[in-house]
C-alpha cells in the first residue's frame, strides 16, 4: 500500500472499510475479522486519502436495510464518504444523504426493481 500511496497519491485513493454487525473490519473475502472499526479509522486518519467507502457486509447484496448507526462515524472522517450494503428503498437513500454520505453504492435494489421511480443523478 505504501508504494501505491507514494506513486499514485492519497488524493486518488478511496479506502474501503468492510465491516460486520459488531463493527469488526472484515478481510480475506469477508471471512475473517481484523480489527474494530474505531481502530481502522484511527489508522486511516494517519494516511490521508480521497475518502472512505463503508461497506456493511452483514447486509450487502440483500436489500435488508442499511446500518443507520454508521452515521455516527461520518463526522470523524475527512474526505468523501460512500456507503454500500442493504439499500432497499428511497428512505434509505434519503437517510444516507442526510447523514452526510456523498455517494451510495446500489446494486441489488436496482436489479430487483426496488428503486423504480427514483431518479439517478
Image: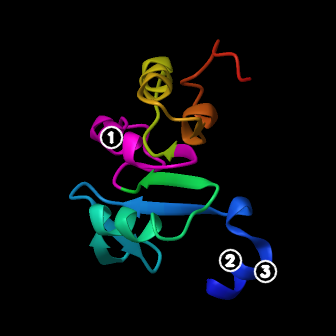
For label 1, the residue is 67
Taking the magenta stretch, the answer to whether it contains residue 86 is no
Give the secondary structure at mark 1.
Answer: loop
In the rendering, which numbered label is found on residue 7? 3
Measured Cα–Cα span from mark 2 to mark 3: 6 Å
Q: Which label's residue is closer to the chain start, 3 or 1? A: 3
Local crowd at mark 1 within 10 Å, few (<14), some, or many (≥20)?
A: many
Percent of width and height locating residue 42: 35, 66
Q: Nearer the viewer, residue 70 or 105?
A: 70
Q: Mark 2–mark 3 contact, CB under 8 Å?
A: yes
Q: Is residue 120 above or below residue 58?
A: above
Q: Is residue 99 left or right of residue 90?
A: left
Which of discs 1 and 2 lies nearer the camera? The answer is: 2
Q: Is residue 39 above or below residue 4?
A: above
Q: Nearer the viewer, residue 83 or 59?
A: 83
Local crowd at mark 2 within 10 Å, few (<14), some, or many (≥20)?
A: some
When asked about the image quadrant of residue 108, the answer is top right
Local crowd at mark 3 within 10 Å, few (<14), some, or many (≥20)?
A: few
Measured Cα–Cα span from mark 1 to mark 2: 30 Å
* Residue located at (60% from left, 26% from top): 113
Which span of residues is magenta-colored?
A: 58-82
Q: Which label's residue is closer to the chain start, 1 or 2? A: 2
Percent of width and height locating residue 54: 46, 52
Percent of width and height locating residue 25: 35, 68
Q: How many marks?
A: 3
Q: Can you say which quadrant of the picture contains the N terminus?
A: bottom right
Which of discs 3 and 1 lies nearer the camera? The answer is: 3
Taking the magenta stretch, the answer to whether it contains residue 80 is yes
Amino acid at each position: 500500500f505504501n508504494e501505491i500511496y507514494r506513486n499514485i497519491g492519497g488524493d486518488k485513493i478511496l479506502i474501503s472499510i468492510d465491516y460486520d454487525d459488531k463493527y469488526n473490519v472484515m478481510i480475506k473475502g469477508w471471512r475473517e475479522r481484523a480489527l474494530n472499526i474505531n481502530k481502522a479509522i484511527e489508522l486511516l486518519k494517519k494516511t490521508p486519502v480521497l475518502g472512505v467507502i463503508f461497506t456493511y457486509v452483514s447486509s450487502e447484496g440483500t436489500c435488508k436495510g442499511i446500518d443507520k448507526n454508521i452515521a455516527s462515524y461520518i463526522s470523524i472522517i475527512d474526505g468523501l464518504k460512500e456507503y454500500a450494503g442493504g439499500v432497499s428503498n428511497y428512505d434509505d437513500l434519503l437517510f444516507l444523504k442526510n447523514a452526510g454520505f456523498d455517494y451510495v453504492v446500489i446494486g441489488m435494489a436496482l436489479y430487483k426493481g426496488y428503486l423504480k421511480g427514483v431518479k439517478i443523478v
